[in-house]
Image: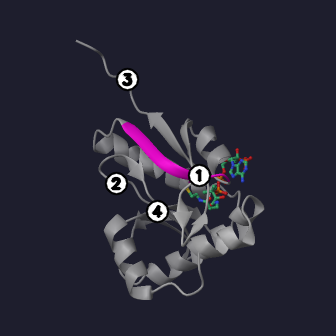
Amino acid sequence: MLVRRFRLGDEHALWRVFHSAIHLIAIRDYTSDQVRAWAPEDIDPTLWRQRMEAINPFVAEHDGQIVGYADLQPTGYIDHFFVSGHHPRQGIGSLLMATLHNEAHDHEVRELTSDVSLTAQPFFARHGFVVVEHRTPAQQGVVVPNARMRKALGNTVEA
Ligand SMILES: CC(C)(COP(=O)(O)OP(=O)(O)OC[C@H]1O[C@@H](n2cnc3c(N)ncnc32)[C@H](O)[C@@H]1OP(=O)(O)O)[C@@H](O)C(=O)NCCC(=O)NCCS
């Protein structure tokens, strides 16, 4: 397993990961309508590429195949965190999470936050995040609930 930065040309594979994570894994916790609103079939490829370029994620590759991706913004916000629905519970998410923690450490990020799906909340909790707010955002007019989760990093010593 290899983790590297996003490269132009990865975007289609990242779309497949995003789509399969939602349609095969998150479907356990969401309705078909919610899943279709969250990961519609008719996404604009240019907008998707621009989105991936903007968040510049880390990409997990196994035998030359992209199997997961996750980003870390300078604020400590994790925008996307997805593992292929064809490769669940193989440690890929944990490897990406460790990569984000290393990146946060290198850039002295003191807190990680994310708006985490119902499906991913046990995984984030396992990695030390706690729920700070239950949210009900709408995607294409359909409410897709999630929770803001937070993890404080490191120990700061007060002067
Ligand atoms: C959540 C997700 C990223 C986890 O990725 P993964 O590669 O399967 O996770 P790992 O194999 O590293 O799991 C590590 C541990 O996290 C916990 N965990 C992972 N998925 C879990 C689930 N669905 N339910 C409960 N616990 C889970 C388990 O403790 C697991 O250890 P175990 O497999 O030995 O029991 C992945 O399932 C996913 O992309 N889900 C759907 C999309 C989604 O909701 N993304 C997040 C948007 S914020």
- Do labels 4 and 2 touch, CB within 8 Å? no
Tell me the SS state at disc 4: strand
- Secondary element under disc 2, as helix, strand or loop, is loop
Dot placed on the residue nearer the N-terminal end, 3 or 2: 2
Which comes sooner in the sequence, label 4 or label 3? 4
Q: Which residue is mark 4?
A: 3
Q: Mark 1 or mark 4: which is in front?
A: 1
Q: Position of residue 3 (x, y in %)?
A: 46, 62
Name the residue tied to disc 3: 155
Please, what is the dominant secondary structure of the magenta stretch? strand
Amino acid, disc 2: Gln
Which one is in front, 134 or 11?
A: 134
Mark in front: 4 vs 2:
2
Q: Which residue is mark 1?
A: 146
Which of the two labelled residues, at mark 4 and mark 2, occupies the earlier sequence position? 4
* Amino acid type, mark 1: Asn
Query: Which of the two discs, 3 and 2, sits closer to the camera?
Result: 2
Q: Amino acid at mark 4?
A: Val
In this rendering, the label closer to the viewer, 3 or 1: 1
Circle on res. 73: 2
Disc 4 to disc 3, C-alpha distance: 27 Å
Residue nearest the observer in this picture, 92 or 121: 121
User: Eyeballing the image, is 158 above or below 99?
Assistant: above
Q: Which residue shows up at 48% across the image and 38% down it? A: 150
Residues in magenta, as a range: 111-118
- Report if the CB atoms under discs 4 and 3 are less than 8 Å apart: no
Where residue 140 appears, x then y in whole percent?
54, 73
What residue appears at the point 34 percent right and 78 percent down from the top-left corner? 50
